[in-house]
Amino acid sequence: MLREITIGQYYPVDSALHRLDPRTKLAGTLVFIISLFLCNNILSYLAATIFLLAVIRISKVPFSYIVRGLKAIVILLMISVVFNLFLTPGTVLWQLGPLKLTREGLRIAAMMAVRLIYLVIGSSLMTLTTTPNQLTDGMEKGLGFLTVFHVPVHEIAMMMSIALRFIPILVEETDKIMKAQMARGADFESGNLFQRIKNMVPLLVPLFVSAFRRATDLAMAMEARCYRGGAGRTKMKPLHYRTADRLAYLLLLGYFAVILAGRFLGGRLVGMF
């Protein structure tokens, strides 16, 4: 399961989405996440589904590779669905003792599951089509106006970029430690869920040691290269918006308008039929 995490990884391929300015992709991801929380009926979710499938097609990243990242959130997804199914008051459809399955709970659970799945896929698409350096430059340039309020934009962008870059590295390190301990007789596969979680505890100490060692090496490397923050630094590849980016912003505005229309008008249209 550890190798199935796709957030933080970069998939190198030549596509229109890869060539977009990182600021455009960051804005698109933010708009898509906001739109998911505005969806409240079938029509709005259908629009989000069509938009997401179109973006996946444009990215040229294999759909199976993107969906593979959902295996890491199966437990969180199940907990969210079960809680919404049986703890939401409303019209009872099925009851077994204190457990009640309601129509409202079924609707909310379905919406929550789709929202969480789309959220993970949308976030993964951003990191799969954008390198860590591009993410740093895009965040720093896009949030540059906050420097007027003395916000350390460059440092924040650098920390987030390093955090995203460390996700696949720590996942790979965890996998190596697990295989080393399994070769020495450790068992991570048998037992119930709680037993498996308990068996994972011995992984934490070597994993934290490895993480701190990598962080120390990175800090020493940055200091050896005289890194002093973003003040006065220039870019080897300055960011510039192109025609494709302007077109992407227009498509984002159109998509967001469709989501708003689906939110406020979709319920009425569905009720009429």
Image (tube, rainbow, N blue to C red):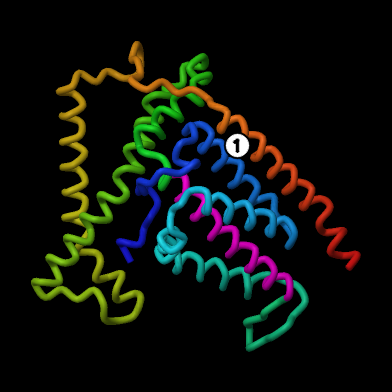
Determine the residue located farthest toward the top in the rendered image.
232
Is 167 rendered above or below residue 229? Answer: below
Which quarter of the picture shows residue 199? bottom left
Residue 126 falls left or right of residue 216: right
**The N terminus lies in which quarter of the figure?**
bottom left
Instruction: Tell me which residue sits at (19%, 76%) in the image.
Output: 187
Majority secondary structure of magenta residues? helix
Instruction: Tell me which residue sits at (46%, 21%) in the image.
Output: 151
Rendering coords of residue 137 (x, y %) = 41, 27
Instruction: Tell me which residue sits at (73%, 70%) in the image.
Output: 104
Q: Looking at this view, is 33 or 62 the one in front?
A: 62
Is 177 rendered above or below residue 8? Answer: below
Magenta includes 175? no
Q: Looking at this view, is 198 or 48 the one in front?
A: 48
Residue 199 falls left or right of residue 272: left
State the extent of the magenta-drawn residues as a range.
Answer: 103-126
Instruction: Tell me which residue sits at (51%, 37%) in the image.
Output: 26
Is 242 rendered above or below residue 43? Answer: above
Q: Looking at the picture, which amino acid does disc 1 mark?
A: Ala
**Disc 1: which residue:** 248
Rendering coords of residue 40 (x, y %) = 72, 57
Q: Looking at this view, is 62 or 271 the one in front?
A: 62
**Other residues around mark 1 within 10 Å, as few (<14) / some (14–19) / many (≥20):** some
Magenta includes 122? yes
